[in-house]
Image (cartoon, rainbow, N blue to C red):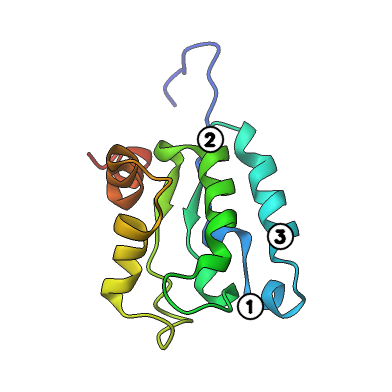
Amino acid sequence: MPQLPEPFTIEKLVIIDHMNISTEVVQKKMVASEIAQAVALAKYPNISIKMSGFLGASNDPYPFRDMTAHLRRVFDAYGPRRCHWGTDMTNTLAKASYRERITHFTEALDFLSEEDRDWVMGRSILARLNWA
């Protein structure tokens, strides 16, 4: 076995899926508290988060205004380089078209700058996984 240089550490990458929102969390009306837990983990640089899961928690139609504050809170905690867009297609097929899922981030979330959108919509996950 090759010798590793000292000190040697392995930093595991963790990506929180769906902003910590599950169907059970929505049913128990615990969205805010679960997002708070996810936000608390932002202090660790090896953790990033998928900005998805909110469609199933939203009571509003597109552009899901009741979720904007939650999305902003996550974005402010993690920043553009550790936030990753996700479609949420599997569990919320009837809630929005694929185009609406994209334009929600590229047009409706006015707290995102053009550069932020570029990172969230793909650049951050490529960098995080060292694919680019």
**Amino acid type at mark 2:** Asn
Tag shown at residue 23? 1
Question: Looking at the rendered structure, which numbered label has been put on residue 32?
Answer: 3
Mark 3 crowdedness (10 Å alpha carbons): few <14, some 14-19, many ≥20: some
Query: Callout 1: helix, strand or loop?
Result: helix
Distance from disc 2 to disc 3, alpha carbons, whole Å, reads: 23 Å
Query: Which residue is disc 2 drawn over?
Result: 46
Quadrant in the picture for the C terminus: top left
In this rendering, position of residue 13 left or right of residue 128: right
Residue furthest to the top in view is 6
Earlier sequence position, callout 2 versus callout 1:
1
Q: Earlier in the sequence, mark 1 or mark 3?
A: 1
Give left or right: position of 106 versus 56.
left
Q: Residue 80, which numbered label?
A: none
Residue nearer the viewer, 19 or 14: 19
Q: What residue is shown at x 45% (from left), y 40% (from top)?
A: 82
Q: In whole angstroms, how far apart are the C-alphas of marks 2 and 1? A: 26 Å
Determine whether 123 is above or below 4 in the image.
Answer: below
Residue 26 in view: yes
Tell me the SS state at disc 2.
Answer: loop
Q: Which residue is drawn at 36% across and 64% down?
A: 104
